[in-house]
Image (cartoon, helix red, strand yellow):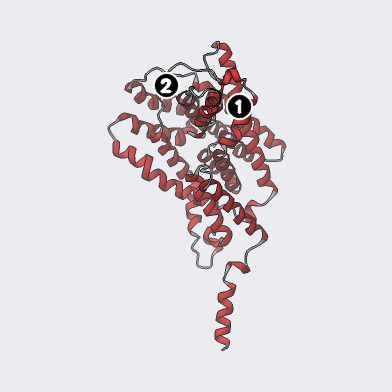
């Protein structure tokens, strides 16, 4: 009888109810909110669903993220090994390969001024860097946090790993992906605040046709120029341009399809669940995380504002030929930010089609954020 009682007692105490803290319950609730936003509201479900589920798992069963040193049998948890691929910068680089294979750089090639709009939107990153220093982060921590302003999750994870800021990687990644998902909510008020009704209704001329030769040369030239100036950007820019070369060359369709579909989705699953699993209550519910979330939002808002204001400047210089709304797409949340530019412009004039014009700054922002990460790595001698 005592054996049965002891066995039942052991089974009972193995349930999560005896081990969960108040913090765990809070994080489980946060995970459920993320799942609601992803499934019901459609906010970047490919990202938020695996992130939220990883968050749910680690706060119910912490050992799923345990290192080999933390376990009795010397074998780490499943999601710990996924997370190592984040720390080693493997998954972020593979994400860029997939993005390159999925992206048409034609709008950027047809309108090179988009590079300036993409560069202007990176202002939020460097503004947030100095603000993070003031809030008590060390220089590398401030750099890792500030890159959230580019609204680029893979670059945020890549830079945090390269700068040795693994302890901040979870909150940084969750903040970056959350703001990517919330682009349709965060950006429109800022866009409307800094533009007039007349500016938002500006119709832009159709983009010129881009030849196949231009599209093939573009990834090669960008890789040579950018990686020669900033070799530290090679893992991100190189993979982005390799994926795009797969797409535009037309001779490796199998590689294009694999990089943009099967490989991309596998990497998203691994990266999303591992990032979510880094948000245990003990690691996530603290003031440092609060500062990261606030700084990320400030950086993202400032990046959007800088892009729109630079768009206004170009609108003035070109005598009304550029709609300032496309400047907000300079953050690298592809293609969500470009869609938001289209949506806000269409609210003023339903016949106004800005999507392809906004895709230029949008893909320029992807390159710009990678360059910003490379600048930080060069500064710290990484």
Is residue 248 shown above or below 144? above
Q: Residues within 10 Å of mark 2 (few under 14, many from 20)?
A: many
Q: Residues within 10 Å of mark 1 (few under 14, many from 20)?
A: many
Residue 143: x %, y % from top left: 61, 36
Residue 203: x %, y % from top left: 50, 18
In which quadrant of the rendered view does residue 177 lie?
top right
Is residue 365 visible to us here? no
Report helix, strand or loop for mark 2: helix
Quarter of the image containing the N terminus?
bottom right
Q: CA distance from mark 1 to mark 2?
A: 25 Å
Is residue 225 shown above or below 157? above
In which quadrant of the rendered view does residue 200 lie?
top right
Residue 94: x %, y % from top left: 43, 41
Q: Residue at x 65, y 46 (%)?
A: 289
Q: Residue at x 64, y 42 (%)?
A: 293
Residue receiving disc 1: 191
Determine whether, in the image, residue 272 is placed left or right of residue 307: left
Quarter of the image containing the C terminus?
top right
Residue 221: x %, y % from top left: 40, 24
Residue receiving disc 2: 109
N-terminal-most mark, 1 or 2 = 2
In the image as oriented, which residue stretches furthest toward the front? 350
């Amino acid at each position: 009888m005592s054996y049965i009682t002891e066995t039942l007692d052991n089974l009972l105490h193995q349930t999560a109810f005896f081990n969960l803290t108040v913090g765990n319950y809070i994080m489980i609730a946060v995970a459920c909110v993320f799942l609601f936003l992803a499934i019901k509201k459609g906010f970047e479900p490919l990202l938020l669903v695996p992130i939220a589920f990883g968050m749910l798992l680690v706060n119910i069963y912490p050992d799923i993220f345990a290192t080999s040193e933390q376990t009795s049998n010397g074998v780490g948890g499943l999601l710990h090994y996924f997370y190592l691929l984040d720390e080693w910068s493997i998954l972020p680089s593979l994400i860029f390969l997939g993005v390159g294979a999925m992206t048409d750089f034609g709008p950027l090639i047809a309108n090179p001024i988009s590079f300036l709009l993409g560069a202007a939107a990176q202002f939020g990153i460097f503004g947030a860097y100095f603000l993070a220093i003031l809030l008590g982060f060390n220089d590398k921590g401030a750099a890792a946090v500030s890159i959230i302003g580019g609204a680029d999750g893979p670059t945020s994870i890549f830079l945090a790993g390269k700068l040795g800021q693994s302890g901040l990687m979870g909150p940084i990644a969750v903040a970056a992906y959350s703001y990517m998902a919330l682009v349709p909510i965060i950006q429109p008020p800022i866009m409307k605040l800094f533009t007039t009704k007349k500016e938002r209704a500006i119709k832009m001329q159709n983009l010129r046709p881009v030849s196949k030769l231009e599209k093939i040369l573009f990834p090669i030239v960008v890789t040579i120029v950018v990686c020669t100036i900033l070799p530290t950007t090679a893992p991100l820019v190189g993979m982005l341009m390799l994926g795009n070369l797969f797409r535009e060359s037309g001779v490796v369709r199998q590689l294009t399809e694999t990089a943009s579909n099967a490989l991309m989705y596998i990497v998203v699953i691994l990266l999303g669940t591992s990032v979510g699993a880094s948000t245990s209550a003990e690691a996530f519910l603290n003031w440092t995380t609060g500062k990261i979330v606030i700084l990320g939002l400030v950086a993202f808002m400032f990046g959007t504002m800088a892009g729109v204001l630079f768009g206004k400047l170009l609108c003035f210089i070109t005598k009304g030929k550029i709609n300032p709304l496309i400047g907000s797409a300079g953050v690298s949340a592809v293609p969500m930010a470009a869609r938001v530019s289209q949506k806000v412009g269409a609210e003023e004039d339903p016949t106004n089609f800005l999507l392809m014009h906004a895709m230029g700054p949008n893909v320029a922002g992807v390159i710009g954020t990678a360059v910003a990460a490379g600048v930080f790595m060069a500064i710290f001698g990484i």
